[in-house]
Every structure is written in C-alpha cells, then in structure tokens.
C-alpha cells in the first residue's frame, strides 16, 4: 500500500455528518472497503490493516487540516473529529508511550494552538478556521486525558463541539507526553537547565537555545537533520550512508527512506539504492532480534554509527511485533512501487518469514510475496 494513501471520497463522506455519533460513523466506515462497495473483504490489506488504515487516516487529517484554512465547514470539522476518533480507537490497545501516533497528537496541539498568522476564514456555516482548530485540539486533549474512547462514542461532532464551547479552552500539560517521546527517542531530549547550551542534538543539527527547544517539537530537528544528511550524501557519502542505514524503526525514518527512493535522490548521486535498503533492513532486523532478549544491565544499551542508534528501548514479543509490522509495511511499499527489486532484499525477506513466522501478519505477508515473485516459484520460509 502507498504510504501517502488517504481515505477515498466515499469513505470521507461517511465521516462528514456533524449530527452522526462518532461510533456510528466509524461503524459505517468499517463496513465498506476501499472501493466503497459495502463489503468487508480487503485481501490486499489483510494483516497490516490497523497500520495501513491509521496511515490513511493520518494523511486524511493532514489534507483536511489544509482544507480547513479555506473551507472551515461543519463537514470539514466532522471529518477531522471522526478521523482523530478512529485513529485513537485503532491504536487504543497500544500503551501511549509506544503509540506510533502520539507525536501526531502532541504536534497537532502545539501547531493548532499557535496564534493565527494569516487571515482567518469564516464560512457560510458560521464557523471560523480558528474555532474549528480549537475544537479539534480540545477533542485531542480529551482523548489523551481519558485514554478511553468509549465516553465519546455516542457523541456527534456537533455535540462534542457544544460541550467544548461551554467549557472554554482547557489547560493541558504537554510535558509528560513530550517526555514519553524523548524517552522513546522519537524526540531529542530537551537539555536540563544545568546542561551546556552548546550540546548538539543527535544528527549533527545545530544547537538551539533552551527557549526554542522547550517549545519546539524535536521532529523539526529531524527535518533539519534530513537536509544535512542529503548534503552529506553528496559531499561525504562514506559517512552519510552508514548513518542512513542505521535509522531507527519509525514511520518517519521509513518515510524518509521511501522519499529518497521515489525522488531518485540516491541514483542522482550515483549511489546504488539496493545495498542501502538491504543494509537498513539488516540493521532493523538486528534491533528487532535484540527486542526479544531480556534487558541486561551488564550489556551496553546502545552503540552509535554517525548519529544512528542501535539502542533498544522496548523488549518482548509485543515490541518485536510492532517493529516487524512496520518493516512489512515498508517492504510492501518498496515492492509495490518497484523502488527496489525483490532480489536485492530476498535474503532479508527470507529471514523475516522464517524467524518471525509466529506473527500472523508475517504468514500473510509471505503469501503476498510469493504471489508477487515471478510465477510464484520462490519459496519464502517454506
């Protein structure tokens, strides 16, 4: 599946009714497939359904956030509320600190609570962009506070907004959530007051004043790091390539690697992408294998290669399963878009299919891979 895929127009229409309860709207969504024909069969999405649907919801949220700037309608707000609700429901069983979309919610609050820097649009519905953004932020805060979607299930977007309007802007401390992201190395850790301001964050980004790091999401540093790395791929490929192949197993890293391939960045610099991707998957498999080992205080927790980290934060089968699902999503995307030939990562695929056969999604992935291979004559994990 395309990592940039969003909900279809038919699916969006199901979420755009402001008077329909959130749970009812999402039940209707579950009954339809990507073609909107009312069936539940999605054979091409089997196994990675929650991951892939979550990505489609996230991409839809990004699209409708932009639309809200010029078209702040009730139906726009309804889509945003319902998508946030569905995204939360799909990932509710994952501990919040391990939730791959925690950074999305944190950054949405930070971004949408900033004062408007452009003319505020007001639609014929009588709702402004700033009001729409505030309603969405209040809903995200309520979800994070409750850690339980059930209390919002029977409320419609309009009912939720009436309640939020009545209570006014709520206070909300983002620091515990930012700390979770720092501890999981999604964000760089904010320097303590006694730490030197000249300490550079990981990825060779320039040091920021403490005031900036305290209020700015660290993924902005990741954006700067990406630009720096692309420059170093041209000037110091022997340094930059190992850094690229030792990225963590995160959506942001996988998206960056996919973008480099889609835009032909590596090829334009005379860098063969196949060994880069193969090395990255091998690195990811080493990390995943370590997750299956019990934490040991006698062994070093991390080793670093040019900004890349071997650190393993989580241990156990749940952590391994999350990592493997992300890898499968990444590899499916590479194969479907023909960004890397299957033969270039054949042995990595074989290792996944053998080592992690106990994961249901891996068994389904193996069926997908064998169907994609020439004539189905290659056996993976057989």
Image (cartoon, helix red, strand yellow):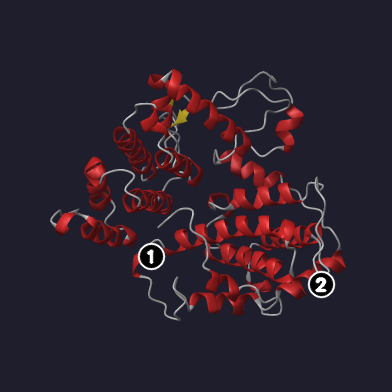
Percent coordinates x, y for residue 379 in the rendering: 15, 54
Tell me the crowding category of disc 1: few under 14, some 14 to 19, or many 20 or more residues within 10 angstroms, Cα based: some
Is residue 168 shown left or right of residue 304? Answer: right
Whether residue 382 appears in this view of the structure is no
Residue at 34% of width from left, 33% of height from top? 276
Q: Which residue is mark 2?
A: 162
Q: Residue lying at the far left in this picture: please name it.
A: 377
For this rendering, which residue is in front, 143 or 162? 162
For this rendering, which residue is in front, 293 or 39? 39
Marking on residue 45: 1
Is disc 2 in contact with disc 1, using a CB cutoff of under 8 Å? no
Q: Quadrant of the C terminus?
A: bottom left
Is residue 263 shown left or right of residue 215? Answer: left
Q: CA distance from mark 2 to mark 1?
A: 37 Å
Tell me the crowding category of disc 2: few under 14, some 14 to 19, or many 20 or more residues within 10 angstroms, Cα based: few
Percent coordinates x, y for residue 124 in the rendering: 81, 70
Is residue 233 shown left or right of residue 28? Answer: left
Vertically, is 299 above or below 58?
A: above
Q: For the image shown, how many numbered marks are present on the structure?
A: 2
Vertically, is 262 above or below 268?
A: below
Percent coordinates x, y for residue 302 in the rendering: 45, 30
Q: Quadrant of the N terminus?
A: bottom left
Helix, strand or loop for disc 1: helix
Helix, strand or loop for disc 2: helix
């Amino acid at each position: 599946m395309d990592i940039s895929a969003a909900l279809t127009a038919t699916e969006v229409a199901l979420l755009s009714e402001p008077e329909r309860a959130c749970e009812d709207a999402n039940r209707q969504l579950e009954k339809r497939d990507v073609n909107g024909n009312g069936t539940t069969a999605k054979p091409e999405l089997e196994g990675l359904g929650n991951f892939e649907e979550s990505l489609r919801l996230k991409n839809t949220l990004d699209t409708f956030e932009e639309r809200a700037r010029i078209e702040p309608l009730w139906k726009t707000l309804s889509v945003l509320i319902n998508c946030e609700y569905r995204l939360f429901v799909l990932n509710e069983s994952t501990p919040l600190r391990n939730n791959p979309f925690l950074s999305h919610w944190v950054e949405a609050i930070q971004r949408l609570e900033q004062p408007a820097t452009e003319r505020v649009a007001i639609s014929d519905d009588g709702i402004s962009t700033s009001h729409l953004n505030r309603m969405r932020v209040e809903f995200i805060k309520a979800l994070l506070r409750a850690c339980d979607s059930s209390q919002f299930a029977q409320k419609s977007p309009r009912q939720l907004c009436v309640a939020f309007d009545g209570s006014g802007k709520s206070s909300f401390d983002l620091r515990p959530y930012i700390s979770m992201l720092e501890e999981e190395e999604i964000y760089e850790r904010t320097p303590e007051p006694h730490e030197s301001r000249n300490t550079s964050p990981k990825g060779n980004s320039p040091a920021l004043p403490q005031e900036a790091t305290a209020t700015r999401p660290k993924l902005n540093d990741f954006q700067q790091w990406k630009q720096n790395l692309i420059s170093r791929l041209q000037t110091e490929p022997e340094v930059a390539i190992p850094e690229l192949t030792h990225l963590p197993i995160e959506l942001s890293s996988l998206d960056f690697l996919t973008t480099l391939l889609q835009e032909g960045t590596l090829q334009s610099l005379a860098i063969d992408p196949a060994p880069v991707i193969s090395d990255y998957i091998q690195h990811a498999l080493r990390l995943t294998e370590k997750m299956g080992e019990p934490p040991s205080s006698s062994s070093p927790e991390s080793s670093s290669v040019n900004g890349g980290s071997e650190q393993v934060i989580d241990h156990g089968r749940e952590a391994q399963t999350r990592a493997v699902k992300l890898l499968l999503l990444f590899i499916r995307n590479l194969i479907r878009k023909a960004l890397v030939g299957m033969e270039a990562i054949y042995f990595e695929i074989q290792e996944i299919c053998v080592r992690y056969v106990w994961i249901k999604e891996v068994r389904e992935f193996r069926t997908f891979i064998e169907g994609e291979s020439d004539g189905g004559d290659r056996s993976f994990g057989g």
